[in-house]
Image (cartoon, helix red, strand yellow):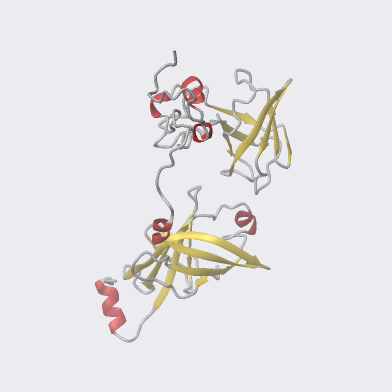
Amino acid sequence: MAFHQGLSEHLASGATQLAHAWAITRGDGVMLGFTDHDRDLAFEGITFRADTGLSALALQQGVGLAVDNSEAIGALSDAALREADIDAGRFDGAEVRCWIVNWGQVEQRQLLFRGTIGEIRRAGGAFTAELRGLAEVLNRPMGRVYQKPCGAVLGDRACGLDLSLPGYAAEAEVLAVAEARVILPALPGYEPGWFARGRLLVLDGAAAGLSAPIKRDEGAGDHRQLDLWQALRATLVPGDRVRITAGCDKRLETCRYKFNNLLNFQGFPDIPGEDWLVAQPAATGQTTGGSRR
């Protein structure tokens, strides 16, 4: 790793004033900065706070496809890392960057680590977060599965559908919540089941930014009942606003008639099924594939 020239000279001097600085960018766009120095540092538009108690074990980095990893250790603080945010999953998969920096001249710095947060363990008023390097994504299995259902995710690049088009999303105010069940107004114009297999996104309140897949969508009189696959990991209360998007069951007919997106269907509807594998030979002896007469 080639260090910044000024930092290299500083290291060679033998009398160093070094600190580590960490930047965490959550999936909702919130960015937090921390340092193990005894005073705040600032660079790249980020203020790295000194009173957080965040530190890290020695980074383990190497060549090849091995996963670079470390652990960040810190104390939970209402002003920085809140226990409620960790429980809600707001730090799951968050981007992490770590620099070594001359705290006397912060322009003399070097990026040491870049990756994401993995598993987070909590004990009392402290936490330990696993840090996963960029090479981890290279260990994920990739490829395409040949199957009848569509392999794309609704609205992603392979699907190509613009979910902002009219009819594919709705916003409403929550009327009631019971664990994984959310009650909304009737939503006229959307038939029951339209949002099944879709997604619910919370727009405001304590759970703002969190989302969950929708298991069931039922209309009942003057209200709409949504059952989620699992309850949100933060409190959702009546009066909070949510945005729900239409669901897709991955069938060719749904892609064609519900979304008018047949050209982007990523499945293989004509692939032979299991019945073809156990088909018996023709009794007539004719095996040309032609019609029997």
Q: Is residue 14 left or right of residue 260?
A: left
Image position of 281 with respect to 84: above or below: above
For the question of whether residue 51 can be seen, the reply is: no
Q: Nearer the viewer, residue 249 or 21?
A: 249
Residue 273: image location, x then y, percent: 50, 33
Q: Is residue 4 visible?
A: yes
| Quadrant assignment for the C terminus | top left
Q: Which residue occupies 49% across, 74% down?
A: 57
Q: Name the residue: 41% across, 43% down.
A: 144
User: x, y (%) of residue 251?
Assistant: 51, 28
Q: Which residue is nearer to you in this view: 64 or 58?
A: 64
The reply, left or right, for residue 221 in relation to residue 283 is right
Q: Residue furthest top?
A: 293
For this view, does 9 lie left or right of residue 256?
left
Residue 69 at x, y percent in the picture? 45, 68
Query: Could you say which is closer to the camera, residue 208 or residue 134?
Result: 134
Q: Position of residue 14 (x, y in %)?
A: 32, 86
On-image quarter of the N terminus: bottom left
Horizontal placement of 116 versus 82: left or right? left
- Extreme-bottom residue of the structure: 14
